[in-house]
């Protein structure tokens, strides 16, 4: 596991997950015959690598494609185009039996754990189902394993017989974490896993996730809109805008020297601990464009304060501007503050 924000990037550990040219379009249908009239381009040509034991944050405003990307990685959304490699194996086209061994290694923690729990089923029995489906444990073994799992995430044996409504939001999220790590995965997607929790509870859950990562060498794809949490929790950050990746770098590199105008605007919105902190809030004009009809050239040019004619025509290339710091912008590194 990484011991600092920079170590994963510098030491180049083994690649666990790799995405190449991922696209996910949702068809738009209309008319009496419900014929296809276009596509919502939720994810557009996304490529990156995730290393063993690292936490990669995925950030961007609502509608940028963060959650769709996470669901596509797990196969919950069928890809329109692209390839996904997990442990050096291309997984999206595997047959069901072949894919099952990889599915066990890839899990997800959702934003609202209550929505994914049966309100009429006791928590212990819900967690036992994981082992019923994937193992041949006896009833006694399953109960013992579930109790151990509950204790692993900070709950108690007495919680085994309780129903979902008898838990607080933080406790329900711990149950979601317990379910995610039940089969000893190596990769977990955290989709806004702490955004619905109080700040104090957020800190406890994040600490739990870090401890589990250290103990089991977990890799996280951490989807969030809270840049403060991402800065604390992650090793690297991927910034998305309108389904496109616009910047990728280490937490220190990206927060200290954001290269893309969109990244600069996001970082300027982070609350500062002191009212006397020197900060200029960058306010973008306009709203996020329609993903069914994205702008030509650079998708951000309609809101970018430094956009030029070239931005309207030519889509910027994804380049390594600095070591391990990637960006897609014709004017990368130019400050807009």
Image (cartoon, rainbow, N blue to C red):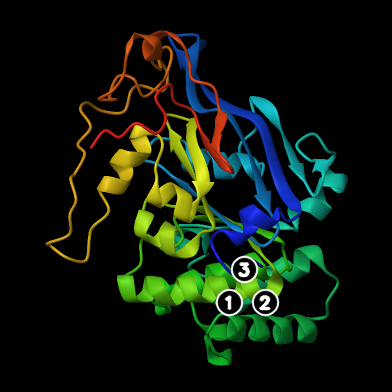
- The residue that appears at 42% across and 35% down in the rendered structure is 64
Q: Earlier in the sequence, mark 3 or mark 2?
A: 3
- The residue that appears at 32% across and 40% down in the rendered structure is 264
Q: Nearer the viewer, residue 306 or 92?
A: 306
C-alpha distance separating marks 1 and 2? 6 Å
Tell me if label 3 and label 2 are in contact, CB under 8 Å: no
Q: Secondary structure at mark 3?
A: helix
Q: Which mark is residue 215?
A: 2
**Vertically, is 114 above or below 62?**
below
How packed is label 1: few (under 14 Cα within 10 Å), some, or many (20 or more)? some
- The residue that appears at 37% across and 75% down in the rendered structure is 201
How packed is label 3: few (under 14 Cα within 10 Å), some, or many (20 or more)? many
Residue placed under numbered mark 1 in the picture: 211
The reply to whether residue 247 is visible in this rendering is yes
Q: Secondary structure at mark 1?
A: helix
Tell me if label 1 and label 2 are in contact, CB under 8 Å: yes
Kindly indicate the quadrant of the structure image that contains residue 277. bottom left
Q: Nearer the viewer, residue 164 or 313?
A: 313
Residue placed under numbered mark 3 in the picture: 179
Query: How many numbered circles are shown?
Result: 3
Comparing labels 3 and 2, the label whose residue is closer to the camera: 2
On the image, the x and y values in percent for residue 117 come to 52, 64
Comparing labels 3 and 1, the label whose residue is closer to the camera: 1
**Vertically, is 182 above or below 116?**
below
Residue 124 shown left or right of residue 239 in the figure: right
C-alpha distance separating marks 3 and 1? 16 Å
Q: From the image, which quarter does the C terminus lie in? A: top left
On the image, the x and y values in percent for residue 95 come to 85, 39
How packed is label 2: few (under 14 Cα within 10 Å), some, or many (20 or more)? few
């Amino acid at each position: 596991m990484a011991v600092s924000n920079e170590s994963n990037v510098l030491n180049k550990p083994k690649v666990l997950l790799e995405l190449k040219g991922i696209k996910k379009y949702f068809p738009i249908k209309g008319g009496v015959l419900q014929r296809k009239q276009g596509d919502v381009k939720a994810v557009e040509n996304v490529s990156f690598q995730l290393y063993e034991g690292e936490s990669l944050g995925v950030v961007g405003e609502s509608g940028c494609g963060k959650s769709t990307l996470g669901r596509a990685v797990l196969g919950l959304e069928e890809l329109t185009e692209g390839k996904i490699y997990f442990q050096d194996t291309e997984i999206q086209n595997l047959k069901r039996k072949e894919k099952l061994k990889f599915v066990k290694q890839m899990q997800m923690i959702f934003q609202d754990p209550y929505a994914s729990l049966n309100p009429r089923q006791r928590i212990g029995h819900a967690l036992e189902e994981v082992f019923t489906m994937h193992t041949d444990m006896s009833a006694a073994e399953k109960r013992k394993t579930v109790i151990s799992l509950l204790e692993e995430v900070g709950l108690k044996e007495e919680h085994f017989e309780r129903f979902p409504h008898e838990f607080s939001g933080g406790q329900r999220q711990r149950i979601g974490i317990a379910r995610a790590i039940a089969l000893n995965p190596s990769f977990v997607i955290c989709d806004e896993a702490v955004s619905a929790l109080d700040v104090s509870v957020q800190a406890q859950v994040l600490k739990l996730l870090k401890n589990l990562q250290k103990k089991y060498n977990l890799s996280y794809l951490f989807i969030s809109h809270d840049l403060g949490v991402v800065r604390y929790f992650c090793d690297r950050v991927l910034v998305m805008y309108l389904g496109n990746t616009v910047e990728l770098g280490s937490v220190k590199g990206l927060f200290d020297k954001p290269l893309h105008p969109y990244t600069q605007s996001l970082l300027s919105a982070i609350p500062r601990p002191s009212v006397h902190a020197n900060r200029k809030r960058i306010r973008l004009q306009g709203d996020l464009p329609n993903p069914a009809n994205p702008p030509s050239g650079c998708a951000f040019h309609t809101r970018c304060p430094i956009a030029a004619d070239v931005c309207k025509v030519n889509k910027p290339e994804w380049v390594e501007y600095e070591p391990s710091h990637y960006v897609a912008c014709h004017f990368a590194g130019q400050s807009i503050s």
